[in-house]
Image (cartoon, rainbow, N blue to C red):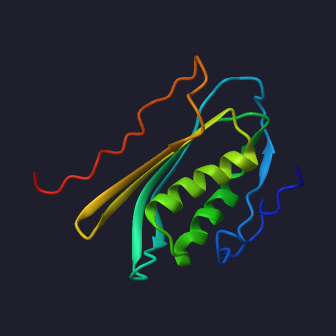
């Protein structure tokens, strides 16, 4: 694990998710079982068919292992999707898998609550495995989309 490159520095938004670097720092509570939640209620990527923006509310929950993700690098990584074309499923699952593969938490899940496109809201969920026994996992707190009804 290298020294975080973003802490305390002005950093431009990466031009793509592939160029974005995620930084990890030692978990100050390694060995403790606890949950960390990140919510990105204004996540944006581009529709691969139309090139128009797609919007989602992402919720990322994880039980740290030896490292935790540095929040500024996560913010920049998520922001790098603004000019990235991808289907909702690929974007949501790809974010979860990249975090899981690089950070190696004990457990991770991501919920992508995508706003309607073509009249159909799409919610995408991925998790690494069953949560560890004894981990308190609260509901993600994002209601399914409802129009007038």
Q: Quadrant of residue 10?
A: bottom right
Q: Residue at horizontal 77%, vertical 23%? A: 31
Q: Quadrant of residue 5?
A: bottom right
Name above or below for residue 58 compared with residue 30.
below
Classify residue 58 as left or right of residue 68.
Answer: left
* Residue 99 showing in the rendered view: yes
Q: Residue at horizontal 77%, vertical 55%? A: 23
Name above or below for residue 45 compared with residue 64.
below
Q: Which residue lies most toward the right here?
A: 2
Q: Residue 32, how many percent across, how many down?
A: 71, 23
Q: Residue 69, how many percent across, how many down?
A: 71, 48
Count of marks placed on residues: 0
Q: Residue at horizontal 51%, vertical 75%? A: 85
Classify residue 76 as left or right of residue 145.
Answer: right
Classify residue 64 as left or right of residue 137.
Answer: right
Q: Which residue lies most toward the left here?
A: 149
Classify residue 49 as left or right of residue 77.
Answer: left
* Residue 62 showing in the rendered view: no
Q: Which residue lies most toward the top here?
A: 134
Question: Considering depth in this image, is 45 or 142 the residue closer to the camera?
Answer: 45
Q: Residue 92, how many percent across, how many down?
A: 51, 56
Q: Residue 88, how many percent across, how many down?
A: 44, 62
């Amino acid at each position: 694990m290298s020294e975080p490159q973003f802490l305390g520095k002005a950093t431009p938004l990466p031009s793509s998710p592939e160029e974005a670097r995620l930084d990890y720092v030692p978990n100050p509570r390694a060995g403790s079982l606890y949950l960390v939640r990140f919510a990105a209620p204004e996540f944006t990527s581009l529709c691969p068919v139309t090139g128009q923006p797609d919007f989602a509310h992402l919720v990322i929950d994880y039980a740290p292992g030896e490292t935790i993700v540095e929040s500024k690098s996560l913010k920049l990584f998520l922001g790098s999707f603004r000019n990235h074309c991808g289907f909702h499923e690929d974007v949501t699952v790809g974010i979860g898998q990249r975090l899981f593969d690089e950070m190696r938490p004990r457990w991770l899940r991501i919920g992508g609550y995508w706003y309607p496109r073509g009249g159909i809201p799409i919610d995408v969920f991925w998790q690494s495995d069953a949560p560890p026994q004894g981990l308190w996992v609260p509901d993600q707190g994002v209601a399914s989309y409802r129009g007038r009804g």
